[in-house]
Amino acid sequence: MDKKILVVDDEKSIADIVKFNLENEGYKVELAYDGEEAMDKVYEVLPDLVILDIMMPKKDGFQVLKEIRREFKIPVLMLTAKEEEVDKVLGLELGADDYITKPFSMRELIARVKANIRRVEFSNGDLSNNDDVLIINDLYIDLNKYEVRKRGQVIDLTLREFELLKFLASNVEQVFTREQLLEEVWGYEYYGDIRTVDVTIRRLREKIEDKDGEYKYIMTKRGVGYYFRRA
C-alpha cells in the first residue's frame, strides 16, 4: 500500500515541487495551503506523515501541530526558516518528530521522509512479535506495544521520544554523545542542529522524571553526552 503524505505550505510553488518529487518516489501526496485545510485533510486522508510549514494563514504550523498531537501520533516534519532557531526548538517541544530548514535540497527532504516512515514501519512491524519489556525502578517500557508506564500510569510519548528512551534504557550506564544519539535514534546522516537531542531529552525528562528536580533516569555526562542510570 502506498504511503500517504500530507504537504502543508501556503507557497503553492513549493508545495507543487515537493509533491512532484515525492510522487516520483512512489508516495501518494495530498496538499493543503493553510492551517484549517491542513486539519481537514488530516482527518480525511489519515496521512502516514505530515510535512508542515510554520508560517501559514488561518492557523500557523504550531497550532496545527498541537491539534495533530491531541489525537494522532503520525510523524510530523516541520519546515522552518533558516534564521529562526527558536522555531526549531518550539516545534520539537510541541511534539514535532523532525525539522528541515528552508531553503532545503529535495534529496535531504526525501531522506528525512524515508527515515521517519521507516521508523513507523519498524515500530508497527518488526516488534509485533517481540514481548520484550524493560522494567527499571518504577518505569515500565513495553517494546511490543510501544507503551510506557510510570507507577502504573501511562505516559504519552511521541514516537521519537519513545525511540530515544528505548535506546538509552536498552544500554544502561553507557554514555552516548549527541552525535551518536542522532545516528542511532534519528537514523540518518543528520544535517541539522545537534540541539535536537537536547530538546528531545528535555521533553522526555519532563514526562518520565519526578517533579522534585532530581533526575533518576536520564543523566548528563558533562562534556560528553547522556546515559540511562541503572536502578
Image (spheres, rainbow, N blue to C red):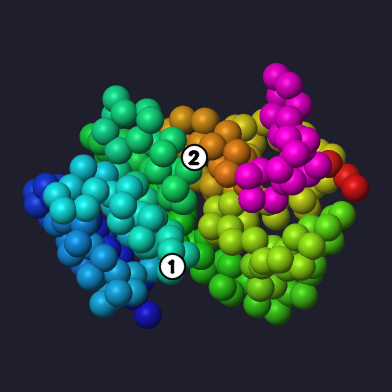
Question: Residue 198: image x %, image y %?
Answer: 58, 34
Residue at 77% across, 75% down: 131
174 vs 22: above or below: above
39 vs 46: above or below: above
Circle number at residue 189? 2
Q: Is residue 219 visible?
A: yes
Magenta residues? 205-228
For disc 1, the neighbor class at 10 Å (few under 14, some 14 to 19, many from 20) is few
Under tag 2, what secondary structure?
loop
Q: Is residue 17 visible?
A: no
Real-space Cα distance between discs 1 and 2?
27 Å
Occupied quadrant, residue 39: bottom left
Q: Amino acid at mark 1?
A: Phe
Mark 1, residue position: 72
Residue at 36% across, 61% down: 67
206 vs 46: above or below: above
| The magenta stretch spans residue 227 | yes
**Quadrant of the drawing holding the N terminus:** bottom left
Question: Residue 71: image x %, image y %?
Answer: 43, 69
Which of disc 2 and disc 1 is earlier in sequence? Answer: 1
Q: Is residue 224 left or right of residue 15?
A: right
Q: Toward the viewer: 111 or 127?
A: 127
Question: Residue 101: image x %, image y %?
Answer: 31, 36
Q: Amino acid at mark 2?
A: Glu
Q: Toward the viewer: 17 or 107?
A: 17
